[in-house]
Image (tube, rainbow, N blue to C red):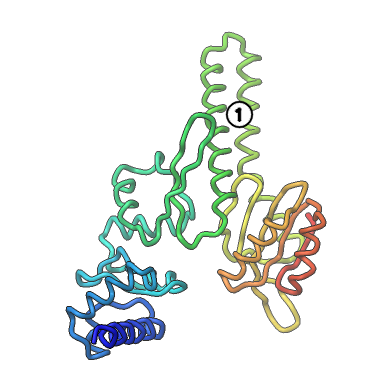
Amino acid sequence: MVETLKANVEAEKIRIISFIGRTGPIVSNTIAKTLNLNSFLTAALLSELVNEKRINASFIRVGGSALFYLNGQEEQLMKFTNFLGHKEKETYELLKKEGILQDKQLHPAVRVAIRDVKDFAIPLKVTKGNEEILFWKFRFFYDADSKIKELLEEKSEKTEVQKEEMLIGEASSTTRADALRGKIRRKTEKSVSIEKVLEKWAAENKIIVQELIIAKGKDAKAKVSVKSEIGELDFLLVLKNKKSISESDLAMAYQDGLNLKLPVIFLSSGKLNKQSQQYFENMGKNLILRKL
């Protein structure tokens, strides 16, 4: 009798898992009605499945109910962001746009809201010296390491510029002040020059920049169009202005292309090492390498 009951319970669980696999994220009531199950039994079975880690429950609430989904269906949760509160929706959009946000630099209201969009905001703690810095990563952003590195470099540059500006204020020598101002100006020009590098190369190669995605530090990304005999072809242009190109650099660029469903033009002045050369050769036409 007990064994029969266990078998029936497992059979219903399998029905539920199969149903979620076909529909994507879905609420408990819909599962119960469609599978003709008692709502209380359905809730109990779903709870067990979540505890067994066979399915997942969202933090988003649709009519007061969580969404139940399988591993691999996480991105489908973005279809339900209209059920987020106003401030949470704004925070979600900001995080999605930026990819990485530093907690300390957020407006207080956003700092609160970002902790309530747990389906999309992944906390990352980075230690720099004696300081532990909290970042938030958009769940489907795949270049977190590079972006965090850029943000930390920007922070260091700003700190240094602020120190130099203080020295200018205190400097009694006009020559000393002018020299420091020139140094600050060069730093500022350097921080925006990567966008000009991309635009210049695109213009020289008759490539149309449709959308600049990011241009910070030594990296830039843009959606571009290339004219051909069969019309305009769309690409993701990834620029990394560095001396050596690693396999990881190419892999992340390729992944970005997959996310946007675009082939990739990888632009750099750097050289490939043995591993990255092998990776490039295996990519075929999905990854095009160009020199600055």
Q: Secondary structure at mark 1?
A: helix
Left or right, 285 with reference to 39 = right
The total of numbered circles placed on residues is: 1
Q: In the rendered image, which quarter contains the C terminus?
A: bottom right
Residue nearest the observer in this picture, 37 or 98:
37
Residue nearest the observer in this picture, 44 or 77:
44
How far across and down, in percent of the image, does residue 65 sit?
23, 71
Left or right, 73 with reference to 180 = left
Q: Residue at x 17, y 78 (%)?
A: 40
Residue nearest the observer in this picture, 55 or 104:
55
Q: Amino acid at mark 1?
A: Ile
Write down the residue under mark 1: 184
How far across and down, in percent of the image, does residue 90 sit?
34, 57
Where residue 53 sits, quadrant-wise, is: bottom left
Question: As displayed, is residue 132 above or below residue 59?
Answer: above
Q: Residue at x 80, y 57 (%)?
A: 291
How far across and down, in percent of the image, does residue 253 sit?
65, 61
How far across and down, in percent of the image, does residue 231 sit?
69, 81
Question: As displayed, is residue 133 above or below residue 292?
Answer: above
Q: In the rendered image, which quarter contains the N terminus?
A: bottom left
